[in-house]
Image (spheres, grey):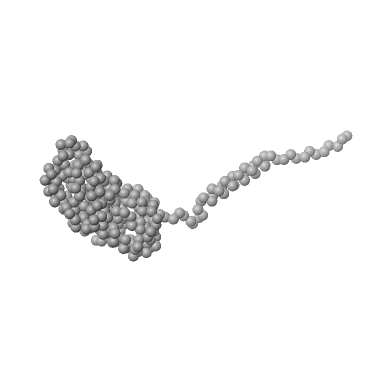
Amino acid sequence: MTASHPSRPEPDLHLDSTAHLMNSIGSRLAGQLRLVPPLGRRRPAPPALVLVAHGSRDPRALATVRTLLDRVRELRPALPVHLGHIELNEPLLPDTLAALGSAQAVLVPLLLSRGYHIKQDIPEMAAAAPARARVAAPLGPHPLLVEALYDRLREAGWPAATDEATRRTSAVVLAAAGSRDPDSAADTRRTARLLADRLGVPVVPAYASAANPTVPTALRALAARGRHRVAIASSFAAPGRFATQAAQAAPWIAAAPLGAHPAVARLILHRYAECLATPWTEAA
């Protein structure tokens, strides 16, 4: 008999394929894990948004600003949002900045044009604070500001559509706080032109203080031109003495201040993002 030889074991193709598959999965998993931050390390929080309000003795102003702040937080829940006042109300801006420590912050002025507060007060407060702060542009001029002004006029009774005869006798006075800074007047005139384009009637800027014309003077000038159906658009962030005086002078309808209008909340976030999009330069 011929002796039989034991057969040689063939390569285990199944085990080789399984090992290859497991190596492949392991490599992919390692690559995915490299994208996950180690425990205890999170992405840094974005710079804080500090809304800078002027401040007012009218208690409605503070309530309005707080409501606007809540609306901003609703739009960006993950964004640290704080409030600071230039004067008259707490928290004052220096106290808000001190509480932020050395964190980065973008100060968004709740002001509608350039002027002394934008160019001097706010940058000086920012420079004196431990927080690494920069100052965004004022809210105006901007199409979102005009959207809010238009909506407030519509709420007060401005018609959605008018015929040509009615437009010839209609106009709007854009009532603003006023400033001796010529840049402030230039910004208000630009906002007035944008609103005039939206309404299809003349819009004349007028001021509560520090600049001309006053609201009564602007109304008289429009009446002399046959414009007797005149509305007051309130270019004020919140209720207060100036807004009340302007509304009382209205010969027809007077819009409410901008307040917590949704377009204003979006504009605040736009100015914040716009400021972050430029190279970081701390306030000096």
Examine the image and state in which quarter residue 132 appears.
bottom left
Of 198 and 255, nearer the camera is 198
Where is the C terminus found, in terms of image quarters? bottom left
* Quadrant location, the N terminus: top right
**Relative to 226, does residue 85 appear above or below in the rendering?**
below
Which image quadrant is residue 150 in? top left
Relative image position of residue 107 (x, y in whole percent):
33, 57
- Residue 197, by quadrant, is top left
Q: Can residue 91 be seen in this view?
A: no
Residue plotted at (21% across, 37% down): 161
- Asked if residue 5 is positioned above or below residue 250 in the image, the reply reads above
The image position of residue 137, as x and y in percent, is 31, 54
Number of numbered discs on residues:
0
- Left or right of 248: which side holds 24? right
Indicate the position of residue 234 as horizontal and vertical percent values. Answer: 21, 49
In the image, 284 versus 3, the foreground residue is 284
What x and y, as percent, mark residue 199? Answer: 22, 41
Task: Say left or right for 24 vs 113.
Answer: right
Asked if residue 280 can be seen in this view, the reply is yes
What residue sits 15% from the left and 44% below the top?
230
Question: Residue at horizontal 20%, vertical 39%?
Answer: 159
Q: Which residue occupies 12% across, 48% down?
A: 220
